[in-house]
Image: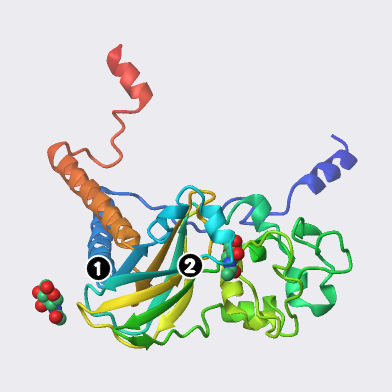
Amino acid sequence: MDASTRTRSNSNKPKYSRFTQQELPAWKPILTPKWVITSFVIIAILFTPTGLLCLWASEHVVEIIDRYDDDCLPDSYSTNPDLYIQSRSTNKTCVRTLKVPRKMTAPIFIYYQLDNFYQNHRRYVKSRSDKQLRDPDEADETEDCKPQDHLSGNDDEPIVPCGLVAWSLFNDTYKFFKGNKAIDIDKKNIAWESDKKYKFGSNVYPKNFQKGGLIGGGELDDTKPLSEQEDLIVWMKTAALPSFRKLYGKINTNLEANETITVVIQNNYNTYEFGGEKKVALSTANWIGGKNDFLGISFLATGGVCFFVAVSFILLYVLKPRPLGDPTHLSWNRNQAAQ
Ligand SMILES: *[C@@H]1O[C@H](CO)[C@@H](O)[C@H](O)[C@H]1NC(C)=O
Ligand SMILES: *[C@@H]1O[C@H](CO)[C@@H](O)[C@H](O)[C@H]1NC(C)=O
């Protein structure tokens, strides 16, 4: 071998490093039965009480839900609900009575719940213009909003806020009474602070909204900037699932057990056309949030499975012990034994 080849082969050799040679210190656990069983037992011990605690907290949330779309449609319109909703002269007032099952401590959250309403539909979600919502100089940014982009046939009259999401704004209203006394509803701060600050402009005002053509939903106060139209902001945070709740307001007084609450609803929103459902929900909240058993059940299920696995391993370990690193079950050993 001549000198030049040797230098070349030398130069190809990578520099020694512990990384390329895979000599870095590493954790090489030996999963002995004791170690494995102990880990499963610890997980079971931690998760089971946590699950019970979550279920207990969820159980203490008091919730009243009332579906009203069917009952609030007058019988004479049951075959033609569109006519009822779209007419300005029909009486949309609907009175419901609710009974408070247990004491509800303020703040009590009022939600409207829609079922079978696909706010996650691809074309619906995209039918909005975030630029326009933010910036008064971008009122013409409406190309994603078709067909709710301009007043019909007039390109100089952009709709602000444009698009189907804004156009379909929920427009039922609720009033609550205890006896003859109205209960105050606090509608301030129901939207996300960050939305009000960054996504909806404080100098963008509604324009040409719900004017002319078919009306899709609620109207907006033209004298208020979008950043103060909290119902719109809540509505435009599109829901991921076809059954969803959105915050309507808050009640800042306690409701006692067995009290009767009267709800006066303006049944304006058209869910009849697509078989949707409308519900009004009152709920208290604690550290776990609203009523939801899912978290507790998943903690309990995980804890239960770990406990079951731990017990099975203990039984296996007691009934059929094997020495650690036992080679008799390796395939070549098995073959030898068979021959
Ligand atoms: C409410 O929205 C419906 C469409 O869902 C519309 O037909 C109706 O005119 C609206 N009513 C009011 C009072 O805004
Ligand atoms: C509510 O009503 C139930 C049954 O009518 C009664 O047992 C309970 O004591 C009442 N609770 C209060 C706080 O009045």
Circle 1 or circle 2, nearest the eye: 2
The residue to which callout 2 is attached is 92
Q: In the picture, which quadrant includes the C terminus? A: top left
Looking at the rendering, which quadrant does residue 89 occupy? Answer: bottom right
Q: Amino acid at mark 2?
A: Lys
* Front residue of 194 and 148: 148
SS assignment at label 2: loop
Residue at the spot 13% in from the left edge and 38% down from the top edge: 319
Q: Amino acid at mark 1?
A: Glu
User: Does residue 74 appear to the left or right of 156 in the view shown?
Assistant: left
Which callout, 1 or 2, points at the residue further toward the start of the chain?
1
SS assignment at label 1: helix
The residue to which callout 1 is attached is 59
Which image quarter has ligand 2?
bottom left
User: Does residue 186 appear to the left or right of 136 in the view shown?
Assistant: left
Residue at the spot 30% in from the left edge and 28% down from the top edge: 329
* Front residue of 195 and 42: 195
Would the CB of label 2 be found within 8 Å of ligand 1?
Answer: yes
Counting from the top left corner in percent of width and height, residue 94 is at 41, 68
Counting from the top left corner in percent of width and height, residue 296 is at 30, 62
